[in-house]
Amino acid sequence: MAAQEFSPNDLTERFTPLKLSSGRVHPFLLYGTGFKGDQTGHLAKLALKNGFEGLDSANYPTAYNEVLVGDAVQEALKSGVKRKDILIQTKFTPSWAHAEGKLPYNTDQPLEQQVRESIEQSFKNLKVDHIDILLLHVPFKDEEDNLVAWKVFESFVPERISVLGVSNFPLAAFEKLYDAAAVKPEIVQNRFHEKNGYDIGLRAFLAQKGVIYQGFFLLKANTEARAANVVTRFAKQFEVQDEVAFYLLVLGLGKVSIVNGTTNEEHMRTDVEKVEKLLGDQKTAFAIKSYLGEFEGLLQKIAEQRI
C-alpha cells in the first residue's frame, strides 16, 4: 500500500488538542486505574505527580477501586493541584458484567434506579461534586436498555456531569445509541488491537461525528504492529522507546487518546514528557507525517489478515 500524503492542515488537525463540548481539553494520555488492586491509590497519585492530567476509573469492583482513586484526587487537591486540572472519568457497568459478589448497587429495583444509584456511589467514592466524563462501560444484553440507561445519564448533564460516552461498543450498537441520544456521546473507549481490526470502521464513523476514540490495551495486544519496521524506525529517529513510538503513531491517527496503565513511575514521567514534547512542537509533529501513511497501511493489512 502506498504511503499516504498529508497536508499541513491535516497534520495540524490530527495533533490539535482534543476539545470536549464542556470546553475542557481532553489530554492525549489518561491514566488507567483498572486492575491495580490495593496499589490503585498509590499509582494514581504517582500518575498525577508525574504529569498525567486525567484518571480513568469505574464503579466496578471487579477490576477497579474507585474509593482509592478518590483518595488520590483529594490528596492532589490538598497539595495545591486545581480541580480543573484533573479530568475525572468513571463508568457505570450493567449488572451482567460484574463478577459474583462484586455488584455495588441493588438490582432489586428498576433499571433507571440501578443506574442512578451507581452514579451516586461514584460521586461518593470519588469525593467530588462534579464528574467530567461518565461512560457506559459495556452494552446491555438488550440493546433497548442502553437507551434506558442513557436517559438517566442525560439527566445529570451538565449540572453534575459534563460529558458522556461509552466503552466496549461495536459500531452498530454505537450508531443506534448515537442516533437516539439527546446528549450525544463524545467518547468511545475500546480495546485497540488486531482482533477487532483496530476499529477502523468505527473510527471512521467517529471522525465524521467529531467523537474522540480512547484506545486501551495497546501494548499487550499489539505485538505484531509494535514490532513493525515503521515503529522501530520512528523510535530511532525521535529517540524514544518503541512503546512511546507506538503511542505517538496511534495518536497520529487523529482524534485519538490513550488510556495508559503503566505501573512504572519512570515510564509515567517519560511517556507524558515525550508525547507533550513531540506533539507540542509543530515542526516535529509535521515530521511525523512521513510515517503515518505507512502505519495506517500496516494496521489495514493486519486487520484484513484477521478477517
Image (tube, rainbow, N blue to C red):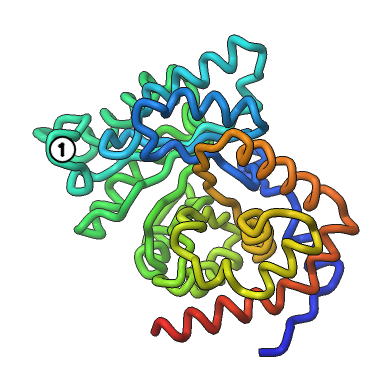
* Residue at image location 63% in from the left, 43% down from the top: 26
Residue 81, above or below 205: above
Q: Identify the residue under disc 1.
A: 110
Residue in the foreground of this view, choosing between 18 and 153: 18
Circle count: 1
Quadrant in the picture for the C terminus:
bottom left
* Residue at image location 54% in from the left, 45% down from the top: 260
Dot 1 falls on a residue whose secondary structure is loop
Residue 93, above or below 84: below
- The picture places residue 58, in percent across and down from the top left corner, at 37, 36
Quadrant in the picture for the N terminus:
bottom right
Residue in the foreground of this view, choosing between 142 and 288: 288
> What's the residue type where badge 1 is placed?
Pro
Q: Is residue 294 left or right of residue 103?
A: right
Residue in the foreground of this view, choosing between 199 and 113: 199
Q: Is residue 156 left or right of residue 269?
A: left
* Residue at image location 65% in from the left, 27% down from the top: 85
